[in-house]
Amino acid sequence: MIPGPTPVPESVLVELARHPIGHRSKEFSDIFMSCIEDLKWLGKTKNSDIFIYTASGTGAMEAAISNVISPGDKVLSLVIGVFGKRFGQIAQAFGAEVEMFTAEMGKVIDPKLLEERLSLDKNKEIKVVTVTHSETSTGAANDLEKISKIIKNHGALLIVDAVTSLGCMNVDIDGWGLDIVISGSQKGFMIPPGLSFIYVSKKAWEYNKKSKCPKFYWDFGKHKKSLDEQTTPFTPNVSFVCVLKKAFEMMKKEGLENIILRHERLTKNLRSGLKRLDLKLLTEDQNASHAITAIWPPDGVLVPDIRSAYKKDWDITVANGQDTLKDKIFRIGHLGFVSDRDIEMTLAVTGKVMLSLRGSLKG
Ligand SMILES: Cc1ncc(COP(=O)(O)O)c(C=O)c1O
């Protein structure tokens, strides 16, 4: 029950056992292009170019930055946790002048404060804004639709980290006008880590034309040229692209709206069950990510003890906090191949874990 790598369904595991096929074959090209079409379906877009990188999610983050900025550009990074900060750090590494617009851990970006900040930017110096949709380190989710509207009014390019939201929560790329969106395979996609995805809008291409950052492996131009020829510029992880097709077959059978509703239901049930066990959650209900929930330990109980009790007694892995929240909170992932049964079982086990650890305090 960690927020990625997530459980992998049997049909995907069986497909993984097949011998890799040649990446320049017609057979692979057909599979690759069907994944591109399915990625469009998942992100609700007809207007974006989509590239699949053989890399983890951070690779796609670096691709997004290096393809649209030039050294010295002003980037506003909206930070509500570890991954929002990482976007800012990547932009810094490529020479951008980065301002981190930070909310308290567990909270989300306040649209009013963001509007106020951008209204000060009279000369439109801020070229790019980065935002995390679902912040895995805290379990908080920004209101992406609202944030996108505000950024549109300002005119900057919006880059979205949808690593733990795509395939779990509604991400309406065309409807909300998101300029670049990235995601990773080991989350809602239900396949192992190793592929990342990037959606590139027309506006992002205009930035790409002017971008002076060095790039080669990530270069949008190279990937676009190959995409037009129904292939990739370099050798992709063919096995994972084949299993991605299998995962999409499952997702399409369930239906996008049902996938989104399932994640919403699992989140609600988990959160209310945890509250019934007298546990305090890091985020408020209205800001909750539907992929991951962060929980404070009961008074006097240590996070490492909680995690080892889940593991030792029940063979369930829950995640630690990250960065400043390490050993302060624990996190339960509920994204991808996760069912109502998994949530009920996790709640039952959580009850037993807390009972025994609280009991040992009294004893
Ligand atoms: C929200 C978010 N962004 C970015 C990343 C980085 O992805 P990766 O670890 O695949 O490089 C993660 C990974 O957990 C994430 O949850």
Image: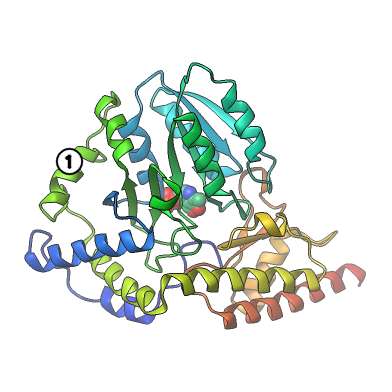
* Horizontal side, residue 46 vs residue 89: left or right: left
Residue most extreme to the right: 362
Horizontally, residue 34 falls left or right of residue 106, namely left
Residue 31, compared with residue 197, is above or below; it is below
What SS does tag 1 mark? Answer: helix
Tell me where residue 74 appears, x and y as whole percent. Answer: 46, 22
Q: Residues within 10 Å of mark 1 (few under 14, many from 20)?
A: some
Q: Residue at x 33, y 48 (%)?
A: 199
The residue at 39%/47% (across/down) is 181
Asked if disc 1 is less than 8 Å from ligand 1, the answer is no
Left or right position of 64 against 291: left
Residue 128 percent coordinates (x, y): 44, 30
Q: Give coordinates of residue 119: x percent, y percent.
A: 58, 24
| Disc 1: which residue | 222
| Residue in front for this viewpoint, 206 or 62 | 206
Q: Quadrant of the N terminus?
A: bottom right
Please indicate whether residue 62 sits to the left or right of residue 284 in the image: left
Pinpoint residue 172: horizontal percent, then vertical percent. 43, 55
Q: Residue furthest left?
A: 25
Q: In the image, what residue occupies the spot 24% across and 40% down? A: 220
Q: Amino acid at mark 1?
A: Lys
